[in-house]
Amino acid sequence: MQSYSLLQRTLFERTLKRALEIVGDEQRLARRLRVPQSDLNAWLRGAEKPPTAAFLTAVDIVVGADELRPVHVAFERRRRPRHQSTHAS
């Protein structure tokens, strides 16, 4: 077991558990994090510290959960087609 503070352990566990709630189950979360499910289980129990890349992916899942709404894209609409101007001087 790697040594890390109680604050870090709590942060890792809470973030991973919230990501788990969002994606639905441990198998899906392990796939999203691209890790073996046994590693994920150890992290969720606080037995091991997750690698930074896996933790940051979990953070992205948590932060992005509110952004799952459809995105409305504004398009510029031209009133007239663009023409090359040929002004004679």
Image: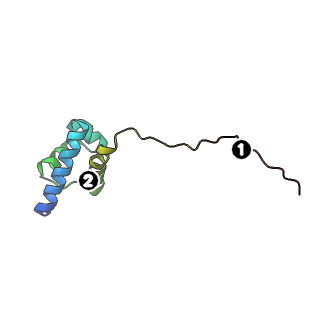
Q: Residue at x 42, y 41 (%)?
A: 71
Q: Position of residue 83 (x, y in %)?
A: 75, 44
Rendered view: 40 above or below 8? above
78 or 66: which is nearer to us?
A: 78
Cα distance between the residues tagged 1 and 2: 49 Å
Label 1 sits on residue: 82
The three-letter amino acid code for the residue at tag 2 is Phe
24 or 34: which is nearer to us?
A: 24
Q: Nearer the viewer, mark 1 or mark 2?
A: 1
Rendered view: 28 above or below 1? above
Q: Quarter-wise, where is residue 7 in the image?
A: bottom left
Q: Position of residue 78 (x, y in %)?
A: 64, 42
Q: Quadrant of the C terminus?
A: bottom right
Q: Quadrant of the N terminus?
A: bottom left
Label 2 sits on residue: 55
Q: Residue at x 15, y 54 (%)?
A: 48
Rendered view: 24 above or below 34? above
Say left or right for 46 vs 88: left
- Residue 34 seen anywhere in this rendered image of the structure: no
Of labels 1 and 2, earlier in sequence is: 2
The three-letter amino acid code for the residue at tag 1 is Arg
Give the secondary structure at mark 2: helix
Q: Position of residue 63 (x, y in %)?
A: 29, 49
Q: Quarter-wise, where is residue 31 in the image?
A: top left
Q: Position of residue 26 (x, y in %)?
A: 20, 38
Q: Residue at x 34, y 44 (%)?
A: 67
